[in-house]
Amino acid sequence: MQNYSKLDQPHNLSSIFYPRPTEITPLPKNAVDVPIETEPGVTIGCRFHIHGLDSPNILYFHGNGETVSDYDDIGPLYNHAGMNLLVADFRGYGWSNGTPTVSAMLDDADVIFCKTRDWLKENSHSGALFLMGRSLGSVSAIDLATQYGDAIKGLILESAIADTIPLAKSLGMNLDEMNFTEEDGFRNIQKIETIKTPTFIFHGARDEIITAVEAEKLQSFSGARTKEFMVIPGADHNSMILTGGRLYFETIKTFIDKVTGMTNWRRRRKTTNKYTGE
């Protein structure tokens, strides 16, 4: 079990996390709330945007300062592209309670993954399960992929963190005072080396918060036999969807189709009536 005690110091947590509490928002069409209790007294808000029972499922960990309800307009776009999307919050974000720490974030992610897998099975969702993490959420997604590689079909990383020190410095953390090294950080590089699951890494070319060099580093150290990499020209840290538009969702779905073997030919064959040709 990794020790995150240096990151979990109160003065560092105020730099790492930006909780934004909100009230529960009305459900978008084809969405359900799936609150998950991660420990007694702590419940994490999760919202599931549903396309279909046999559609691929993405368990999504969002970026810092974001909440589940920020994806109320984005979830339907994943659905339109043929994917189910379950967005999970962090402690203290949205309508989740508790106080965020790095240790709690990763412990919660473990429980969220296991309970999500159970919920999908209980509710007859048979599609393949993928992990996706954006920015800070990449820490949770990568950590889970190291533990549950056999239970997922793929890992998708957007604007992901490679090394902790460059991000910590940009957040104003005094690393010299703590005698902080990469071993004390998220260790995403060390973890991704062990992940054999098909991996797709994409990043904004103009990202100034986590530079595209970090994405290149994750790609080069990735242990996946099947891996894809894309840099979106003109996109910064928070404009990947705005810049990529429809191509953003189509690219994710194309990766998922490749991994699951659902090629265009197979999809056409599956949906074509053998008697009418329609």
Image (tube, grey):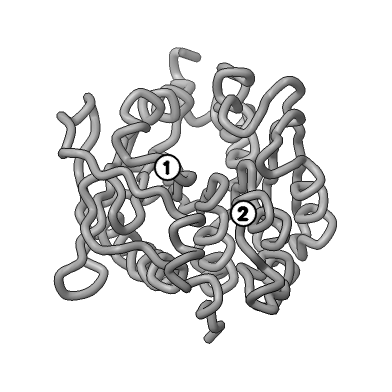
Mark 2 neighbour density, 10 Å: few (under 14) some (14–19) many (20 or more): few
Q: Is residue 142 above or below residue 228?
A: below
Q: Is residue 263 above or below residue 92?
A: above
Q: Is residue 224 above or below residue 107?
A: above
Residue displayed at 24% across by 34% down: 31
Question: Foreground residue, 125 or 234?
Answer: 234
Residue displayed at 47% across by 65% down: 11
Disc 2/disc 1 C-alpha distance (Å): 17 Å
Residue 159: x and y in percent read: 64, 42
Numbered disc 1: secondary structure: loop
Location of residue 94 by image quarter: top left
Residue 3: x and y in percent read: 54, 83
Q: How many marks?
A: 2
Numbered disc 2: secondary structure: loop
Which residue in the structure is indicated by mark 2?
172
Q: Is residue 251 above or below residue 273?
A: below
Residue displayed at 79% across by 52% down: 219
Q: Is residue 180 left or right of residue 14?
A: right
Residue lying furthest bottom = 1
Which residue in the structure is indicated by mark 1?
65
Location of residue 10 by image quarter: bottom left
Q: Is residue 220 left or right of residue 205?
A: right
Question: Foreground residue, 200 or 150?
Answer: 200
Q: Amino acid at mark 2?
A: Gly
| Sequence-first tag of 2 and 1 | 1
Residue 118: x and y in percent read: 28, 64
**Residue 229, disc:** none
Residue displayed at 38% across by 70% down: 104
Q: Is residue 44 left or right of residue 251?
A: left
Q: Amino acid at mark 1?
A: Gly
Number of the front mark, 2 or 1: 2
Q: Are marks 2 and 1 in contact (CB under 8 Å)?
A: no
